[in-house]
Structures are given as C-alpha cells and as structure tokens.
Image (spheres, grey):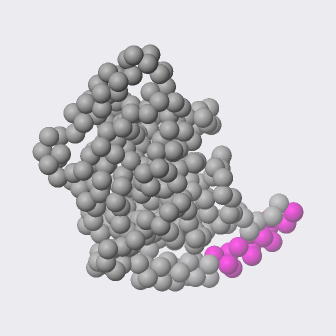
Amino acid sequence: MLPIKRILCPLDFSELSNLSLDYACSLALHYSAELAIEHVIEPLELISPEDEFAEMEKWSGLRSPLAAKAKVKLKALAEAHPSGGLPVEIIVREGRPIDAILSEAERHATDLIVMGTHGRRGVDHWLLGSVTEKVLRKSRCPVMVVRKPAHHFVTPETSDDPMRLERILLCSDFSAPSIRSLEYALSLALEFDAELRIVHVLEDVPKSTEIRDVTEEIQEKLIQAIPAETLDWLRVDATVRMGRPYQEIVQLAVESEADLIVMGVEGRNALDIAVFGSTTHRVIQLAPCPVLAVRVL
C-alpha cells in the first residue's frame, strides 16, 4: 500500500471545492490518513490602492471575524462528511492561496493534495494563473484535481464512505512518471476494488499490416508492468489507441465512464505555460472525471 499518511484539501466553500472534500474524506478513510482542510483568507482583495492606509485599518478589524467565521464553516463541513473517527485538522491561514497551500503541504509532509479546478470566481474553463494550476506546477506531492463530474459516480456503498471508485483509467507511455503513476493506480484499484484500464496512445500510426502486431506487443508490455500477484486480485484491461494522446484519453474516459484518470507528470515545470498544450494539461482541462497527477521530480 502507498504511504498516504496525510491528505490536504484546500477549500474556498465553492460547490467544487466542497465536492473535493468527498474525495479527500474517502481517501483518508481507505488509507487511514490524517486529513487537513484549509481555507485561505486573502487580505489583498480588501485593499484598494486609492486609500491603502484606511483599507489596511479596515482589514485589521475584519481579520479576526473572518477567520472565526471560516473556522465555523470548516468545522461544519468536517462534521457533515463521514470521517470514520479519523482526526480532521482545521486550518485557516491568511495570505496568497498558492503560497499558503504549498507551505502547508511542505510543512507537514503532505502525501496528497485534493482540490477543485476552480473556486469562487466561477470560471468553468481552464485557468492560466489559477490557484489549482499553480499548485499542480509547484507541488512536490501528487495532486488530485476534481471537476464537476459528467456522470454520477460519487455513490457511496455505505453512509460511512462518501465516495466509490469503480473504474480507474491509467495513462501509460512507459516513462518514469507513468511507472510511478502505476503504483498509485494499483493501490487505488485495490483499495476501492475497482476495475483498472491502462491505455497507451500511439501518435505515429504504424502501417496497416503492422497495427495488429504492434498493438498486441504494447498490450502485453502494459500487462507485464503489473506484478503477477496483483493480477490475481484486480480486473485489468490494456488498451491501445491511435491519435492525439489527450483526445484519445478523454474520449476513452467518456466511453468507459471512468471515475478517475491517473497520469504521470515529469519535472516541476511540466505544466508551465510554455507547454500549455501538454497532454496532462489538456486532459485535466477536458476530462469528464477527476484527474490524479503524479509527479516525478
């Protein structure tokens, strides 16, 4: 089992951030992990350049009431979500959200961050410069990005578990990040008794006479990457698609009604603006389900 001992779930009280708490709680239950829920108060939003001194005084008077209100809301959310008796730490910090989230993750050696793709600003397309994107680019631990689902798959088996994963889609290109992401996909599939489908996308389509041989060879290689003893416990399927990777991955996720996509990301800057068209970036933008981005630093 993966050493997931601490999960951080940043919340801004939007619908999507609250949905991400379902995932965070369920993962904490399955891995017996500590769960921290964090809200960040941004003082700069209350300060106008026209009268900075007056605004600073106003902010100093609002700081304590805002923090107290946020703690009450976080506590109510924690109590409304099943935790199986596991501790839920409530954190309210002041500052820039990206800095507060990353510093909290570093300070307590967080193993996983679970968060929504956008917050109270309500933009429903991919955001360059958004808090979620910056966390993806800079976090040292895996990040699960939760979007509004295309189908209803957050269906608990019991009231004690707020989430149920039945179908996990793992994207593999045989790189170091995809090998690392396989560990997470296998662990999650075992924990949730989920079906695991592994997909490899060929951008360079072989000659028609070679397609069958190439496809069978890749499928065999995908299956061989899974420990033999694990195959006794899991339902595993290997799929080869041809075309643009992000399009084929998203289409397969739609067709199979995947509940989660797991992908590897290489390097600290793999999701930077310079590679806006990267496969991982585009899948997160368009996927019909949450995406777990696993980084290799």
Please, which residue is most extreme toward the front here? 209
**Where is 254 relative to 44, above or below?**
above
Question: Magenta segment range?
Answer: 50-64
Does 250 appear in magenta? Answer: no
Does 62 appear in magenta? Answer: yes
Quadrant of residue 190 within the rendered picture: bottom left
Residue 64 appears anywhere in the view: no
Quadrant of residue 46 within the rendered picture: bottom right
**Where is 275 relative to 109, above or below?**
above
Residue at 78 percent across and 70 percent down: it is 55
Query: Residue 215 location in percent, x, y?
Result: 35, 27
Magenta stretch, overall SS: helix
**Where is 115 relative to 283, above or below?**
below
Please, which residue is most extreme toward the right here? 50
Query: Residue 269 location in percent, x, y?
Result: 52, 36
Residue at 54 percent across and 39 percent down: it is 247
Residue 77 appears anywhere in the view: yes
Query: Residue 281 location in percent, x, y?
Result: 55, 41
Query: Disc count in the image?
Result: 0
Pick whichever, 33 or 17, lies toward us: 17
Residue at 65 percent across and 50 percent down: it is 127
Query: Residue 61 location in percent, x, y?
Result: 69, 79
Residue at 59 percent across and 54 percent down: it is 131
Image quarter (top left, top right, bottom left or bottom right) of the C terminus: top left
